[in-house]
Image (tube, grey):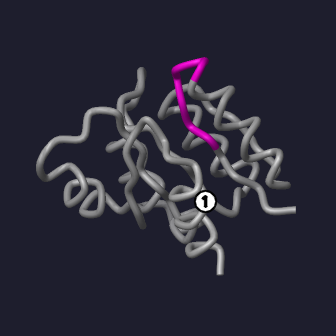
């Protein structure tokens, strides 16, 4: 079963996405902040990470940079997610090391397409 690390501090967003992904037969592991995301990326070796960018402790931008700088986990694809989509955010997320970018509220079928593309 494909394992997805969902990094989201908003309980409602986290629960909704986790349930919908589980219904599509993904094994969902949750992290609530950037520090926990880095730790869980190392410990559970997910197949893909969905990373909120606005997080406590370490924000998503920095968590992505640290994951991509770590030889053991840098190959895990990351999709950056944000509700604060500003001009240039997509480019900044890609420069930080994310493999793709999507906005909130999540359009689930579009996100699924991005997930499936990165898991091939």
Please identify the quadrant where the N terminus is shown: bottom right
Q: Nearer the viewer, residue 59 or 112?
A: 112
Q: What stretch is highlighted in magenta?
A: 6-12
- Mark 1, Cα crowd under 10 Å, few <14 / some 14-19 / many 20+, is few
* For residue 108, side relative to residue 105 (left or right): right
Please identify the quadrant where the C terminus is shown: bottom right
Relative to 20, residue 32 above or below? above
> Quadrant of residue 116 in the image?
bottom right
x and y percentages locating residue 86 in the rendered image: 16, 41
Q: Does the magenta stretch include residue 11?
A: yes
Relative to 23, residue 114 above or below? below
* For residue 29, side relative to residue 73 (left or right): right
* For residue 19, side relative to residue 17 (left or right): right
Residue corresponding to mark 1: 112
x and y percentages locating residue 63 in the rendered image: 42, 43
x and y percentages locating residue 51 in the rendered image: 48, 44
Tag 1 secondary structure: helix
Taking the spot 42% from the left edge, 44% from the top edge, the residue there is 81
């Amino acid at each position: 079963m494909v394992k997805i690390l969902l990094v989201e501090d908003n309980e409602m967003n986290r629960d909704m996405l986790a349930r919908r992904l589980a219904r599509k037969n993904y094994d969902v592991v949750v992290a609530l902040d950037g520090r926990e995301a880095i730790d869980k990326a190392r410990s559970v070796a997910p197949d893909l990470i969905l990373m909120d960018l606005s997080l406590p402790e370490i924000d998503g931008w920095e968590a992505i940079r640290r994951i991509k700088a770590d030889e053991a986990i840098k190959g895990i694809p990351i999709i950056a997610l944000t509700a604060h989509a500003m001009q240039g955010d997509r480019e900044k997320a890609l420069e930080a090391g994310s493999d793709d970018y999507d906005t909130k509220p999540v359009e689930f079928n579009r996100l699924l397409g991005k997930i499936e593309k990165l898991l091939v």
